[in-house]
Image (cartoon, rainbow, N blue to C red):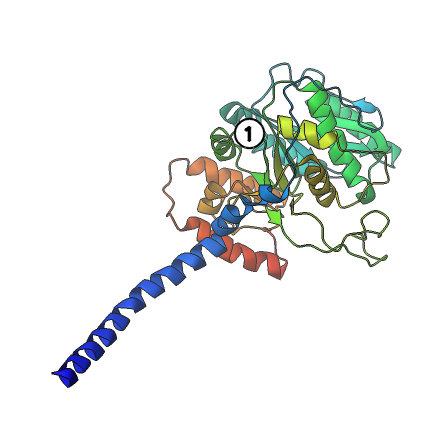
Amino acid sequence: MFPCNAAFLRLLFIHRRHHRWPLIFLVLCLIFFLSVSGYLEEFLSGFLSIFYSTPSDVSALRVLNVPIPPFLLSPASACSSPPFLLILVSSAPSHRDRRDVIRQTWGSLTSSTASSSLTLFVLAVPKSLDERAALIHEAVTHRDIIQANFTDSYQNLTLKTITGLTWALEKCHGTKYLLKTDDDVFVNTLFLTQFLRRVTGLQYMGRLQWHVSPNRDPDSRHYVSEELFGGSYFPPYCSGTGYILSHKAAVLLLEQVRSGPWLAVEDVYVGILAHAAGIAPRHVAKISGSMSVPHSTCCYRTMFNSHGMTPKGMQEAWNMLKEAESRWCPSLALLYCKLFGQLVEQGGDGVQ
């Protein structure tokens, strides 16, 4: 009897082992999907608040005292009816073609009305007198330019961002969310606002950057001296190509701003301010960060934004969305966009 029992148990073990392989395969596929799509990172980022201090109460009216230069251009009537989402686009004076295509596409009146959003451009002062005159004319024509009195340069990107956020809090009361982005980014404003209407509480959201070390190369434009930041790693922060702040989070963040010099790497600096304010960043899988997604309708419908867009590519993306408003996209579209978007980013190719 014993040998028979042993043989039976051996066969049962082999049978069960073979039946475990499909389950193991499914688990591995699930882990792969969650990792590549960004949902695993989104889940893990929810635990970051454990390592942050508790944010202070923001129920009382605060008076901000942010050390920025005076405004030269301010679209006074832009927020006469505060939008649900205010989009602040960092732009350079010479990028008129990018601003114009945004005005014609995702930042247009049609898009803004449908999504309860408002798109404004944040600039500084050009070095050329001709560019200064052209920018004033553009501001008078479109009434969507915020400008403060400092030189427009890469080293002043942080100041440009802080300027835009300060203007928003001072001039656009009632706005619930702020999106900081760049002028080479396509934004699906309708899908983004639909997502934000389901979100509550203090929020600092985007494509999360973890465990990033300061660049100590003095010849790099991303150089950070030990005097400005002495730590080995920056706090987690959201990519500057597109991050979202709730109104109250922006107030707490700006209260941490001190007199310069500031880090020239603006998204890192915002992450440092958020850390000081006790606001843990949240990863959102559908925010692309610095990734350029594949040039396809389903990717522009699935992702909230896409980086590295030329004016031509942005117009094409907008046309794709308009022509396929009710088009069905497969549930694995996000996986496709992320998987092949990573390849685009690594290869350095954007939408042409």
Q: Nearer the viewer, residue 260 or 82?
A: 260
- Residue 6 vs 190, above or below: the answer is below
- Which residue, as the protein is rendered here, is positioned at the far left? 1
Amino acid type at image mark 1? Gly
Nearer the observer, 298 or 116: 116
Q: In the picture, residue 135 is in which quadrant?
A: top right
Instruction: Say which residue label 1 marks.
Output: 201
Disc 1 element: loop
In terms of image quadrants, where is residue 7? bottom left
Return the residue found at the far bottom. Answer: 3
Q: Image check: 285 left or right of 262?
A: left
x and y, in percent, of residue 239 in the image = 65, 45
Tell me if residue 24 comes above or below residue 140 in the rendering: below
Please identify the quadrant where the N terminus is shown: bottom left
Does any portion of residue 143 appear in the rendered image? no
Give the vertical position of 207 relative to 343 (above or below): above
Instruction: Where is residue 57? Give x, y as percent.
Output: 64, 25
Of 288 and 200, the residue lying toward us:
200
Residue 42 shown left or right of residue 250 in the figure: left
Give how far across and how far down residue 54 sits, in percent: 63, 34
**Farthest-out residue, front:** 2
In the picture provided, is 157 more to the left or to the right than 3? Answer: right
Choose top left, top right, bottom left or bottom right for residue 215.
bottom right
Question: Looking at the image, can residue 323 be seen?
Answer: yes
